[in-house]
Amino acid sequence: MMNFQTYFQISILIASFIITVILALIIIPILKKIKVGQIERDDGPKSHLKKQGTPTMGGIIFMLGIEICTVISYIYYKKIGEINLANKLIPILCLTLGFGIVGFVDDFKKLVLKNTKGLKPSYKMLGLLLISITYVILILKFSNIGTGIIIPILKKEIILPIYLYIPFAIFVILATTNAVNLTDGVDGLSSSVCAIIIACLSFLSMGKVPEVSILGSIAIGAILGFLMFNLHPAKVMMGDTGSLFLGGLISCLALYLKLPLLLIIIALIPILETLSVIIQVAYYKKTGNRIFKMAPLHHHFELSGWNENKVVRVFSVVTLLACIIGLLVV
């Protein structure tokens, strides 16, 4: 029989989906009106040139959906007397939103102010770094998480000295946000992959860390709502606003569950996307040649003859399999 917590999570997931779809129907025409359009690279896959002008910065759609539903959950749990649980929801959300705001500023400068360079890389990294430091300090100070990290496969928890845990946690956040950012380059790819990863983390938190399972359910509903408009051919792109937000959310949830090392398994696709860029750049600097037809990895497969839908299907299945393995080793 379904317990109360599970019933609420399913209800808030559905509510998040519906609210995000409604927000998309309102916001996409606004983005079109102010001409916040996608800018495609001339040296990219030729099939992407037709995306030129597609409304981007659409990450604000699911960000708002998640924020609204989290506030609804906060009010509801306050009302039924679960004050401690309610109070744990808002800090995680606010800090995660910080990553989205950094992406929003970057998108705003590029697309609205027509500054093609956007936010300076050093400023963007500084913003992400400051938010990461804030998050790590707050979870250490105001939660009972401690500096423990669970090692997958061994299924053992090790306690890191605080001087090692803080830089490690910051590295996890920065690496994850940038990896998800690189994964966003094909219609529906980053949304699909992130939804599966968040679903995995939410499942692991059920019955143990309710604030993570609630936020995870809300995020899944919102991402699925956004996917209704983001699948090929996309009516809207998430931009850095959405990709940095999702990367921040995934890393924050993983750290909250003491499972940052699990991301090596379940976030396999974002990791491979990142490695493809690193390998491509390093090899090109050394030899003047390229290993991949184009990096990140999804572009290599596109130039090898895969259409966008095939890339999304294959990468999503790989992520699903990786998450199943992840569930078995923790």
Image: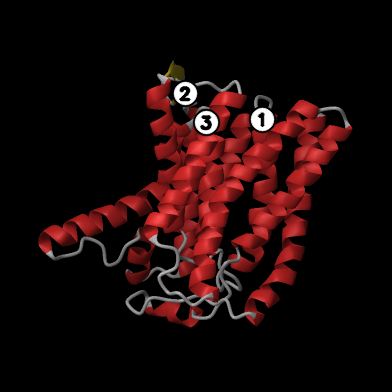
- Residue 232 appears left or right of 322: right
Vertical arrangement, residue 24 with respect to residue 161, above or below = below
- Residue 171 appears left or right of 253: left
Image quarter of residue 23: bottom right
Q: Nearer the viewer, residue 257 or 166?
A: 166
- Residue 74 appears left or right of 167: right
Which residue: 53% across, 80% down?
Answer: 53
Q: Residues within 10 Å of mark 2 (few under 14, many from 20)?
A: some
Q: Secondary structure at mark 2?
A: strand
Which residue carries the number 1 mark? 206
Give the number of marks. 3
Which residue: 54% across, 68% down?
Answer: 108
Residue type at mark 3: give it: Ile
Q: Position of residue 136 (x, y in %)?
A: 51, 33
Q: Position of residue 269 (x, y in %)?
A: 42, 50
Is residue 185 visible from the viewing direction of this image?
yes
Q: Position of residue 24 (x, y in %)?
A: 70, 67
Q: The N terminus is located in which quarter? A: top right
Q: Residues within 10 Å of mark 1 (few under 14, many from 20)?
A: some
Which residue: 75% across, 39% down?
Answer: 9
